[in-house]
Image (tube, rainbow, N blue to C red):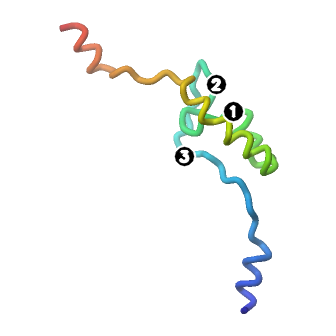
């Protein structure tokens, strides 16, 4: 093998990637990001968390989705109700 491949192996790390999808809006009532579903504390601590801590956060995210109130049609739904 050449030195480049060996170097890549040495510096490769197995890390739990951030669930961020670049839709960073904190829900005012639930205090979680509407994009990735993490709390503000989890977002700010992510870079300092161990892989196990990150995995715990990721495991908890799917259960948080129902906490966010879904849009109910916006203006189009209101106009239908008026008719």
Q: Is residue 2 above or below residue 67?
A: below
Seen at 29% across and 13% down, the residue is 78
Q: Are marks 1 and 2 in contact (CB under 8 Å)?
A: yes
Give percent across and percent down for residue 6.
Answer: 76, 84
Seen at 61% across and 29% down, the residue is 64
- The quarter of the image holding the C terminus is top left
Marks 3 and 1, how far apart at CA: 15 Å
Element at label 1: helix
Residue that numbered label 3 is attached to: 21
Element at label 3: loop
Residue that numbered label 1 is attached to: 40
Give percent across and percent down for residue 45.
Answer: 77, 41
Residue 67: quadrant of the picture: top right
Mark found first going from the N terminus, 1 or 2? 2
Q: Is residue 32 above or below residue 77?
A: below
Marks 2 and 3, how far apart at CA: 17 Å
Element at label 2: loop
Seen at 59% across and 18% down, the residue is 29
Q: Which mark is residue 31?
A: 2
Mark 1 Cα within 10 Å, few/some/many (few <14, many 20+)?
A: few
């Amino acid at each position: 093998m050449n030195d480049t491949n060996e170097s890549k192996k040495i510096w490769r790390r197995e890390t739990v990637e951030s669930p961020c999808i670049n839709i960073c809006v904190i829900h005012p009532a639930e205090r979680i990001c509407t994009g990735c579903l993490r709390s503000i504390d989890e977002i700010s601590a992510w870079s300092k968390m161990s892989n196990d801590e990150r995995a715990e956060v990721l495991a908890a995210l799917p259960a948080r989705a129902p906490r966010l109130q879904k849009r109910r049609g916006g203006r189009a739904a209101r106009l239908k109700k008026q008719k």
